[in-house]
Image (cartoon, coloured by chain):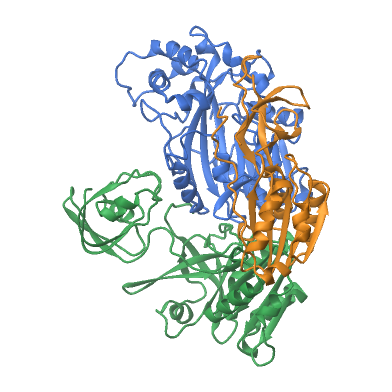
Amino acid sequence: MNTHNGTLSVRVARIEQLTPEIKRFTLVDPDGKHLPAFSGGSHVVVVLEDGDKTHRNAYSLMSSPYDSSAYQIAVRRVSDGRGGSRLMHDKVCQGDLLQILQPANLFPLAKHARQHVFVAGGVGITPVYSQLEELHVKQSTFELHLAVRGPEHTALGLELQARYGQCVHLYVQGQQRLDIRSVLAGRPLGSHVYVCGPDSMIDDTLDSAHALGWTDSHIHYERFVEQGSTGQPFSVTLARQGVTIEVPAEQSLLEAAEQAGYKVPYLCRGGACGYCETEVLEVDGELDHRDDWLSEDDKLSKRKFMPCVSRANCSRLVVDL
Amino acid sequence: MLITGIKSRPVYDRLQPMTGGLRHLIAGQGSGGEAMLRLLADMSETQRHNSTLLYSTESFSGHSHLQALQDADAAGLEVFASNQALIDALRERLGDAHMGTRLYLSGSESFIGTAMQAANAVDLNRDEVLREHSGTLVRRVWCAHCDTYTENVTQRVFTCPGCQLNLVVRDHYSRRLAAFQGIKADGEVPGELPAAEELDT
Amino acid sequence: MTAFKPIETYADAGSDHTYSNSREAILRLPFPYPEDQYMYSMNVEPHVPFGLGALRAQFDIDEHYISECHHRAQTLDSAPGVHYAALPHMMEAQWDLLELLMESYSRDFPEHFTLEKNGSQWHWINRPLQIDDTFTFGDPSTLPMDPMEYITRQAQGEFILLEERDETLVMGAGMATQRADYSLRFNLGMSFMEFHGPVPKLHEMGILQRALKFLLRLRPGHPVRRTNWSITVNPRLETSAETLPDWAPERTIVTPENAGDLVNLRIELQPLHRLPRSNAVLFPVRTYLVSLKQLAEFAPQWAKRMHRVIRDLDQELVDYKGFTRYRDAMVSWLSQYDDGTPVDESQQ
């Protein structure tokens, strides 16, 4: 389970249709073991092969961080997206095996907050699920204000009300209006607000909070940033070997070279130690530096490059490897 | 072991009005009153009317800006005879205060450090607090051997009132204890002390 | 696996110490000098099993396990509140640490440790220390003390928990009965830059900024490791700021004749982990002590290298590591093992 850049295999134990658009998937270890523990707000990336395309979609973990016998994710079917959610809804069945990356957390709770206020819309509720579990175990104070588009979309909100009681407020469009400004007013120092929902909800929350004098360090919203080295695929010529290899979207140059059987010196594999610093002999295009080792001058010179994390957007790249 | 040049000392600000704030708590002592007055002068009328001043007349250097503060235009002024009394009152106010409050601290390092302990207790972050240092750089020192705190230390080497050891004051600062570290000055050879000097001013 | 030594005494107790390494214990050490000269660097690498020595297990234990646990218990009892401290909000990280150590030890040393989980009812058996306990994971009332204290009393090495906040790492809890020259109570609450403040050169070299960025990107399941080192007179584990009056005078008694017996190389192995629920970063410091004499006896190539490292070491590092007074004595004693030929790295 502890492969350094590998994926985890999980089996789909159950699929529930929660609302007309949202399905919840329960995922377990195929051998019945415990899955890796995680913190509230974490997500996993589901890697789906679709012919010659690979979808990599991030989904927040809804399950309890304190029960790692299963993970739960909710997927909203988006008809005009890149197709990952359509695949999940239309093709994945109970019993299927899926490949996921180990959980990572880009939306952690503020551990020192005196009060946590959650504002969520629709499927944005998913990361909040695991965060509430975490706060509940710690007996911390929280409130959830969840807005949904109609009565048929209330399944998750009702579940949370049943679990946590009065601190969960549900607003059904047409029946109750969520006034974010009044939710945030009069809060004690040390309050934090977490917002997950459509851009308009995030903007409204930011505006309301700022108008009430809240500072940015107390306002949190989910943002997905690529981890490791992923991005556009590119080709690179290894001058000393006389070969050109393809670096796919989900691998770094270092990993692609290793997979092709070539050894590249490395140490930290994270762009920090300088060990893999490589000379760029030719580049037609731009280098996408993602390391913390090279100086600004080195990066601009386009003559040095860190193959463990950096990438390129170019038509030709030749390196001294 | 490194004595001087340790980069753990806090970097201080210059007090200026924090525009996003709705209410302003301005707390200072002794010579810190000067920065408080300058801040008020820089504020808009609205900001001044939403400002509460807390001032302690306790001062190592003897400076007092009490008169000028009493004349200043703000929503309220509370005066304290000691820093500790001010900090106790500050702690209570912060406990009841709402989001949108900004805190301004002005005074000695020791005053700021202990006031920050109150600020941390209510999870006030860096974007809600400004701290301007003024006055002498006398230090509060914690003895690593007997756990005693000594206020207003001005010399690099001094005798700990708690355990009588010769202590050297390192430039190493702990924000949790709000104090510099004092450690036995002649640890290797008794009597072999580092150069006596005044601490930086 | 080597048998555990019965309880040895360390130099903390006085000059009559029984601590000594077997040949196997020395040959399995993670020698900290990759070259003939030493300077600080970003020497992190993925923490994956390597060989059969100190780098095989996720958290290494060796023949001194029982002795060290005994030393820890004595040290904690002698000065309550000084060597173990945890800020209240770190409880979740404490449970993460307990889980990590129990799972690692039981997986890597199944002959000594067993962990059985039945939901949140856990059963832990530690045969070397004759411990057999059941408790509820996540419920502090089912353990006799803090989860971190409970498990680290059964672990070799020190453990510091760092909380991520405000784009830095802040010291939140520590079990530090072997610390080299700092105060845990003083450092608790300090940020990464602050607690590294006393170390010379790191700031100017840019190492700290890079190291912090690197650590903030650590993910659960992908630990990294690095080594560090220092020098101690006599095999003394606890050399904290608080007890400096007890151990610092020994720096004056080292001579070129007795350096082999008195001077100990102190190797620190640091396997850094991101903890899953708390998102905290675990900073362990696993300390190995070996006298120059024993090092030279069983690993002459390492002694040869160490002669060169110590002879040419930057004065600021010598001063920081505390052996200014007796560097020359060490170099003099080690020189007998340096014939000027290149170090044979295939040997020890």
Chain letter tied to green: A
Measuring 30% from the left and 46% from the top, which residue is drawn there? A277
In the rendered image, residue C321, in percent from the top left (x then y), is placed at 52, 26
Is C346 in front, or is A184?
A184
Q: Is residue C254 visible?
A: yes
B197 with respect to C45 (left or right):
right
**Up/down of C329 relative to B16, above or below:** above
**Residue lying furthest left:** A242
C52 with respect to A152 (left or right):
left
Is C15 in front, or is B189?
B189
In the rendered image, residue A86, in percent from the top left (x then y), is placed at 44, 81
Measuring 60% from the left and 76% from the top, which residue is drawn there? A205
**Residue lying furthest top:** C257
In the rendered image, residue C110, in percent from the top left (x then y), is placed at 58, 40
Q: How many marks?
A: 0
In the rendered image, residue A127, in percent from the top left (x then y), is placed at 59, 70
Chain letter tied to blue: C
Is A289 in front, or is C179?
A289
Rendered-image quadrant of the C terminus of chain C:
top left
Report which colour depicts chain B. Answer: orange
C118 with respect to C348 (left or right):
right
Among the 4 quarters of the image, the one containing residue B138: top right
Q: Is residue C9 visible?
A: no
**Up/down of C10 relative to B19, above or below:** above
Among the 4 quarters of the image, the one containing residue B41: bottom right
